[in-house]
Image (cartoon, helix red, strand yellow):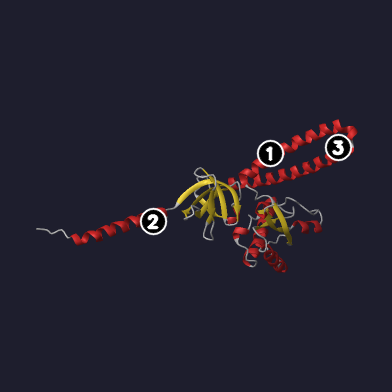
Amino acid sequence: MTRFNLHRIPLVTTLTFSLIVLFSTSTAAQSTKVEGIIKARNGDTMILQASSSPNLVVLLTDSTQVGQVQGVFKARRKQMSMAALVPGLQVKVEGTYDNQNQLVASSVSFKGNDLEDAEKIQAGMHETKVQVQQNQAELEKHNAELKAQNEALQQQQAQLTEHQAKIAANKAAVDAAIARFGQLDDYYIFDELTVYFDNGKIKVDPKYNPQLVALADKAKTIDGYMIEVKGYASSVGSVSLNQRLSEDRADGVTNVLVQQGHIPLTRMLAPGAMGESHQVGNDKTAEGQAENRRVVVRVLQNKGIAGI
């Protein structure tokens, strides 16, 4: 006759409870995939507009993998800098939630066309803001004229109404864009440095290294700083070659800032390869060509972060 050992019941119960806790912990740590649009970005923190949450907080770490999917079937993946994660970009995020319900990203991926569209939107937002400021200055000028010329009040008022309508339309467009993407396109420029290159060269002249390190040290004293790097080329040679030169020059300066200036990648905006655009010198002269072979580095602070 088999005896039922009552002393083993507590042991079985304890093991069962431990397995339940272990299973629950494993389930909580399971990886999650989320798709959405980057609304705002501040260093290692992103705000994502996703179907599950309009303001999902995503944390970036040094181990977060950032990639661009390529190919007809999106089967290839190109490793990208974390600086490519700009507001307005459609992304897929994979990671785990922490105890504050923030998604800690292990990987972030996006399509090349989406990145290009996001950069165009940010450029358009900046141009619209500039136009609004110009219109506002013109409006103030008209107001001063109205005060000094009471006899022409009716004619001046008609012009003022027309300008107000234009300003209102531009302001509405800017406000809508800001509401969607935040204020990360609206920066104060705290410092700027231009690095020049010899014809066809991409290596940074060592004489600029101390200047770049000094600029990096100054940036670290600014709350919420970001660093923008844009590379340019003269129009001598083919367009494709000059585009590549501008990209390699921007990458070279970025490497100095990161490796010698110890600037975190989360504080670097995506290096811009501007090619032959925005020529500042006459490319028909040697002096003008030298002025156009350049990389412009800026230390920026977002106005929203500054609280202004």
Horizontal and vertical percent for residue 50? Answer: 52, 44
Q: Secondary structure at mark 3?
A: helix
Residue of label 1: 172
Instruction: Decide if residue 69 is in sight here.
Output: no
Tell me the tag on residue 146: 3
Q: Amino acid at mark 3?
A: Leu
Horizontal and vertical percent for residue 182? Answer: 63, 47
Disc nearer the start of the sequence (3/1): 3
Q: CA distance from mark 3 to mark 1?
A: 26 Å
Disc nearer the start of the sequence (2/3): 2
The answer to whether residue 160 is left or right of residue 47 is right
Give whichever of 8, 224 is nearer the camera. Answer: 8
Disc nearer the start of the sequence (1/2): 2
Tags 2 and 3 touching, CB below 8 Å = no
Residue 195 versus residue 182 in the image, above or below: below
Tell me the tag on residue 224: none
The answer to whether residue 223 is left or right of residue 157 is left
Q: Residue at x 81, y 59 (%)?
A: 287
Horizontal and vertical percent for residue 215? Answer: 70, 64
Q: CA distance from mark 1 to mark 2?
A: 48 Å
- Choose top left, top right, bottom left or bottom right for residue 212: bottom right
Horizontal and vertical percent for residue 193? Answer: 73, 61
Mark 3 Cα shell of 10 Å, populated few (<14), some (14-19), many (≥20): some
Which mark's residue is nearer the viewer, 3 or 1?
Answer: 3
Residue of label 2: 25
Give whichever of 123, 188 is nearer the camera. Answer: 188
Which mark's residue is nearer the viewer, 2 or 3?
Answer: 3
